[in-house]
Amino acid sequence: MEQQREAGTLGMWVFLVTEIMFFGALFLAYTIYRYKYPEAFAAASNHLDIRLGAINTVVLIVSSFTMAMAVFSTQVGGRRNSIIFLLMTFVLGATFLGIKAVEYHDKYRDHLIPGQLIPGHPFHPEVAKPGDTDEHKLHLPPGVSIRNVEMFYWIYFAMTGMHALHMIIGLGLLTILTIMTWRNRFSPEYYAPIEISGLYWHFVDIVWIFLFPLLYLLGRHLEGHMG
């Protein structure tokens, strides 16, 4: 049983390394284009809702704690507590996706979905004129191309969309684990599936910890620097 747990854990770590390489390509693209178009990226970042992003960050940090407690509860034979913490983790993960859906809807409303991803609803945001404080419009510094802003949103949707897909997979795993725990399939001697799934969940949370400042805080940082 111990050998199976070690083999499963090693397999998950190998899988996570490949995931790091995958997300690494997206981070590299972000770095290159942010360097080329800093003002456009800052303006696009300022249009994101930092409050919703911050709430989602807190939600995922708490979900990492509840996932860790689910693993611990299983290790010590606390079946009831394990179920409670798995359900709490599921609710927090679903909350994250719900908030992200609200953000995506806001981008749809403001015509910020890049390219022709949605037929009949192309990327065509309304640009604010000097003195206009409408938060639904893009506020661009002089000389900033709208196409460079669109590049930010390509990267934004690629990164957050891929992260959301991983979250959905995580919720599927949590559903299966909760059912198995309810059926008393785990014990202090056998808890590898929960432990290994916990590694996956923590990885997805850590990715968001990097995404939040890179996407949501970029404009604020550059504004302060330029000021």
Image (spheres, rainbow, N blue to C red):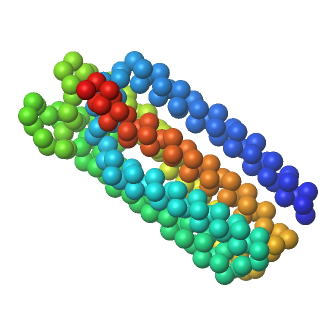
Left or right: where does residue 26 sit relative to residue 197? left
Residue furthest to the left:
131
- For the question of whether residue 53 can be seen, the reply is yes
* Residue pictured at 54% horizontal, 71% vertical: 88
Left or right: where does residue 16 sit relative to residue 55? right
Q: Is residue 105 above or below residue 144?
A: below
Percent position of residue 22, x then y:
61, 35
> Which corner quadrant holds the C terminus?
top left
* Residue pictured at 81% horizontal, 48% vertical: 10
* Residue pictured at 25% horizontal, 48% vertical: 109
Left or right: where does residue 77 sit relative to residue 102? right
Percent position of residue 60, x then y:
51, 56
Percent position of residue 53, x then y:
39, 50
Task: Give the quarter of the image for residue 139.
Answer: top left
Q: Is residue 84 above or below residue 101?
A: below
- For the question of whether residue 171 can be seen, the reply is no
Q: Is residue 64 above or below residue 219?
A: below
* Residue pictured at 73% horizontal, 61% vertical: 195
Task: Give the quarter of the image for residue 4.
Answer: bottom right
> Which corner quadrant holds the N terminus?
bottom right
Left or right: where does residue 134 sit relative to residue 120? left
- In front here: 118 or 198? 198
Percent position of residue 8, x then y:
81, 54
